[in-house]
Amino acid sequence: MLYTIACVLIILWLLGLASSYTMGGLIHILLVIAVVVVLLRIIRGQKPF
């Protein structure tokens, strides 16, 4: 029983480790896109939000 729980936790930890790099990069890309869009709206004279 403890062996199964340990294996599941290790697998979940590895999945979280792999997805944190992927999701972290994706979140940074989305933040950059959002900042660029807000800046473009400000430059064009529209309300940013």
Image (spheres, rainbow, N blue to C red):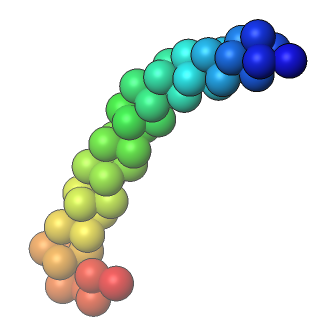
Q: Give whichever of 15, 40 is nearer the camera.
A: 15
Q: Give whichever of 17, 24 is nearer the camera.
A: 17
Q: Is residue 36 left or right of residue 8?
A: left
Is residue 16 visible in the rendered image? The answer is yes
Number of numbered markers: 0
Q: In which quarter of the image is residue 4?
A: top right
Q: Where residue 32 sits: x, y (%)? A: 26, 49
The answer to whether 39 is drawn above or below residue 3 in the figure is: below
Residue at x 50% of width, y 19% of height: 18
Quick one: which residue is furthest to the bottom in this view?
47
The answer to whether 31 is drawn above or below residue 27 in the figure is: below
Residue at x 86% of width, y 18% of height: 1
Q: Where residue 11 sits: x, y (%)? A: 66, 16
Residue at x 36% of width, y 32% of height: 25
The answer to whether 5 is drawn above or below residue 29 in the figure is: above
Q: Where residue 29 sits: x, y (%)? A: 34, 41
Residue at x 76% of width, y 11% of height: 3
Q: Give whichever of 4, 34 is nearer the camera.
A: 4
Q: In this view, does 12 lie to the left or right of 8?
A: left
Q: Where residue 39 sits: x, y (%)? A: 18, 67
Is residue 15 visible in the rendered image? The answer is no
Quick one: which residue is furthest to the front in this view?
2
Q: In this view, does 33 lie to the left or right of 43?
A: right
Q: Is residue 21 left or right of residue 13?
A: left
Q: Give whichever of 14, 36 is nearer the camera.
A: 14
